[in-house]
Amino acid sequence: MTRRNSHVALFGALTGPDGADAALPIDRLLRIAATATRAPITLAVLHEPAGGPLTLLGRHDPAAPAADVTLPQGLLTAVIAAGLPIIVNDTAFDRRYRTAALRGATPAAFAGFPIRDRYEHAIGAVALADRQARAWTTRELDIADQTAQLVSAALPRCSGRRRPGPGGEAFLMALLDTLDTGVAACDADGRLRLFNRALRDMLGAEHGETGPADWASRFVVNDLSGNPVPGEAMPLARALHGEPVRGVEQLVGPRQRHVLVNGLPIVGPDGARLGAVAAVHDISLRRQAERLAECELQVCYALADAEDTATAGAAVLRIVGTAFGWTCGQLWLADDTDDILRCSATWHAEQHDCPEPPPAILGRGDGPAGRAWKTNAAVLEPGDTDRGGSHRTALALPIRDADTTVGVLAFTADTVQEPGDPVVALLSGVAAHLGQFLHRTRAAALRLDLAAARDEYLGLIGHELRSPLTVISTYVELLAADLPADHPGHDDLRSMLDAVERSTGTLRRIIDQLIDLAALDAGQAVVHRVPVDLMAVVRDAAGDIGVDGPAALVVPGDRDRLGQVVAHLVANAVLYSPDGGPVEIAVGRDGPHAVVTVADRGVGVDPDELETVFGRFQRGRNVRHQGYPGAGLGLSLSRTFTEQHGGSLRLDARDGGGTVATLRLPVET
């Protein structure tokens, strides 16, 4: 049989032999439409003139009994009467056609297109139907429309009972070539007869009149793991053996397009198997979008868990490389001082070794990574396969921090890759995430360096100032002790020496606080907890101020550190109470905690500063503006010492003005 004659024979199988009932050829056409659209029900009807009943031309409904020819007459009649398509995604909720849907059988979803005569009058309808509500896609509606047009064109041939000539074959092939869905059909011997443009583009090959035994060598068809699929296991061959095939996912062609394949056997009216048909849907973009979303999510998780740049870079390279089939990857970081890129992390696919390790450094413009750094733009190179290069595709993306390129993310593959705009956009987003991580990491490292330098400075200042202050304090004491009572100006000199002594004491307290802060940051300030009478500690710190509380209250603690805390709270209350305002101190127990409160009627603390004043070198606005002395270290140290005891320290505004400081300590360890 010649190639042309074989196409005519297949068209005859789809449109009916001489003498066949007109409904049978349409059945075969509807079966193809059902396969391409995955519609459970397809049917075609004619409307008799003068208001006569609907005549069934053909129907494909494998789930319905053969004797069941119930039709959605209301919806079909509406299509013919309007002469326009009617699309209903859910007949239960579409008020426009609810009345029509109730006449006759009621499908849940319906898409009908008119069949027209030569004068463009609507004389019938082709419909897709589903027993469940569904949203019809543009592709499915296009196939239904084209099927209605084909039925319109085929009606004269069917009624005339003539075998189609070469023009009918050309019409069918032109129709199939307009579809974005790939379509293949074979005859009863397994020889390919139909093979439309979309499928040729997916497979990158012409079909020829080959059988299943030759398909594996002629076409690149792999399963999702990349393993070749034998010809006899391909969906069209399985359909030829009588197996309905639904939702088989495969990778086809040199570009490994991700496709979804459905297949059905073609059976004649006498039950004889005439061949098989398969519809191949390219779902590469859908699967790619799913991979993009999953990849970006995994990258975010990896960056959230990473502790350093090398760990983060290796994780990102592995996630992206695995998701998109790259072979090797590198993370390059810019060294602006030497004007070079340094390799920070590398990755290669399992069971694949990169032919040679990447260089340790790259200059501007060196390789794809160097060019991406130089141009601040993505670089895609397909590779020079004619020279036998080890990598056939390279992609490099700049990593930016604001307007500065701080690194490059680079990938290579030993197969031809064609990353489209969505992939490049996703990888650019990954590079942006990595840029933000690098910014945070560098900022955190800078903060640590600054904190270390500050603490080292504070410790140095504290120790360097303590010695001269000790000398000053000693000589002041000697001068005060040796000052004769009858010395001229005795009282003035004594007042001066007392002022020097007070200032020296203030400086010494500040220096002690600085040294305590440095010791805390270095982990050298420890508390030695032993049973301590908290009442005794508070009374010692309160001095002449009365303390309301029990005779004794023992807590585990470091007496010196607790004394520092209470003394600072009392000193603050006295300092910030104008004209010697009252200071109230109470000690009690609240369940498992001992509680010390120090309340005053002083200048108070603004509500928005009740927490911030516990920061280092932080003081309230009111005390700063009113000229009260202080370094802003006491509350920070007091809270730190309290927390070392397992307790808490807070400030609250007091009704009527003033502040209440509350110290809570565990009674038992």
Image (cartoon, helix red, strand yellow):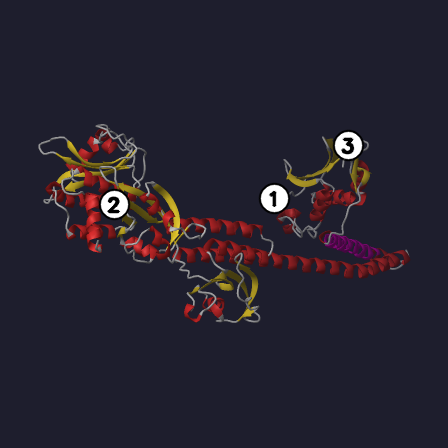
* Disc 2 secondary structure class: helix
Give the Cα separation between the discs numbered 1 and 3: 29 Å
Marks 2, 1: nearer the viewer = 2
x and y percentages locating residue 264 in the rendered image? 30, 42
Could you tell me the amino acid type at mark 1? Asp
Could you tell me the amino acid type at mark 3? Gly
Residue 498: quadrant of the picture: bottom right
x and y percentages locating residue 608 in the rendered image? 59, 44
x and y percentages locating residue 488 in the rendered image? 87, 60
Question: Which is nearer the N-term, disc 2 or disc 3?
Answer: 2
Which is the main secondary structure of the residues drawn in magenta? helix
* Disc 1 secondary structure class: loop
The answer to whether 381 appears left or right of 188 in the picture is right
Mark 3 crowd level (few <14, some 14–19, many ≥20, 10 Å Cα): some
Do labels 2 and 1 touch, CB within 8 Å?
no
Which disc, if any, is residue 143? 2
Q: Is residue 443 above or below residue 634?
A: below
* Disc 3 secondary structure class: loop
Report the front residue among 366 and 586.
366
Could you tell me the amino acid type at mark 2? Ile
Residue 456: quadrant of the picture: bottom right
Q: Which residues are magenta?
A: 494-519
